[in-house]
Image: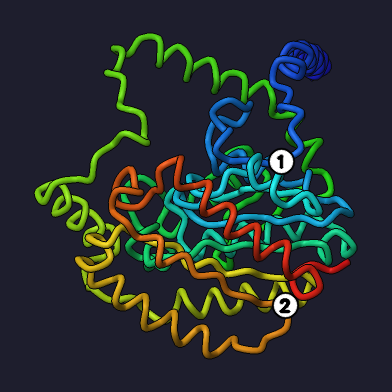
Amino acid sequence: MTIILRQSAILLLFLLLLYGLALAVAVPIMSPPAETNLDTAAAARSPFMTEPKYAFLSRSRLDTGDDKAILLGASNVLAGFRPARLQQLVPQATVHNLAIGGANMTEVRQMVDLVLEVQSPAAQRRNLFVIGAWYGLFADDRARWHTPDRHPGDTDLDIERYRYGFYRRTDDGPVALLPPRWLDAGVTLIKPFLLVDRLARDIGKALRPARAVAAPADQVPVPGVERQAQYLAFWQDYMGGSGRLEAAPFATLVQTIATIRASGGRVLLVDLPLPRWHASGSPYEASYRQHWAGLQQQLAGTDGVAFLSLSDADRPEDFSDEVHPKPRVAEGWARRLAGVLNDAPGHLARR
């Protein structure tokens, strides 16, 4: 027995030394960029590689006492609102974009909760959450997250919660195993795994055949009728096929707003545009408009909640596909958003 214990101790010591060496190599290599603005669009250039992982592992940087504009939503929020440009237009607050491609309202709610759990009460009171909305944000969870590639109901953020053991899955939802205040320490400890993940990605990219270079986004023409039909069919399937939105995701949005207001933060809801052919061709857009009008009526006069509509920016030639604005158009989106953020500091940002 003594020999077994001694050998086990030696093995454990060896493993600890090996892991310490791995940390010594990985920590300097996998240091995050020293950028003022968090931006999930930069995930591929960061140690975290994907938007959900970037958002989940970088959020402790939001525990600051300055005014913060935190953008949430799906990929059209990433394309339409570049934080570096917005920062120039909104100098009185630090602008962060934590939007995640493919996010629905459930995942936005999770992102709000994950941000708040790493912040002090003082930092929470300086939050201004900007939520970019369109019909795709209100996709039903059964259509969005009950797919063969994941545990039923797990969002992309949930997958990151469980990947490195920071949370465990229970019947009542995720339970934190690592206290939020230790998030940065946890990120440091997993850097050897992040390095292995990145090496695997880079090797895979090197082995794959080179792709044809796509045309610059600003030069993409308006899709033809056949391509438009393909886009509409995709979104019909993506949303579940019923042709209408359920009330539950809008209730989740109302609950999320209540959570933000209870923490002392503020909310700006941005109604995002679609190209006219998409808006007129999708039954989900009509359903979204009905629910959105009801939401505006419900929240009218609510302290700390404001709306911005960009729905008039719907020229087909201003979009690179069926959802995303061209880079030249994003400048106009940014200026309109900045105008609201700059003109209403007393209502939207706590000074």
Give, as a three-letter code, the residue at label 2.
Gly
- Furthest toward the left, the residue is 226
The front one of 274 and 207 is 274
Question: Does 71 sit above or below residue 182?
Answer: below
Q: Secondary structure at mark 2?
A: loop
The front one of 246 and 270 is 270
Q: Secondary structure at mark 1?
A: loop
Residue 304 is marked as 2
Residue pictured at 31% horizontal, 34% vertical: 219
Residue pictured at 65% horizontal, 47% vertical: 86
Quadrant in which residue 173 is drawn: bottom right
Left or right side of 21 for 105 = left
Left or right side of 142 for 108 = right
What is the total number of numbered labels drawn onto the structure image? 2
> In 3D space, how far apart are the residues under numbered discs 1 and 2 (Cα atoms)?
23 Å
Give, as a three-letter code, the residue at label 1.
Asn
Left or right side of 227 for 180 = right
Percent x, y for residue 338? Answer: 65, 57
Report the quarter where the N terminus lies: top right
The front one of 171 and 206 is 206
> Is residue 174 something one can see in this rendering?
no
Percent x, y for residue 350? Answer: 84, 69
Report the quarter where the C terminus lies: bottom right
Percent x, y for residue 265? Answer: 76, 69
Residue pictured at 30% horizontal, 45% vertical: 321
Question: Does 218 sit above or below residue 68?
Answer: above
Percent x, y for residue 78? Answer: 51, 46
> Is residue 106 something one can see in this rendering?
yes
Residue pictured at 40% horizontal, 43% vertical: 326
Residue 134 is marked as none
Label 1 vs 2, first from the N-terminus = 1
Residue that carries the numbered disc 1 in the rendered image: 37
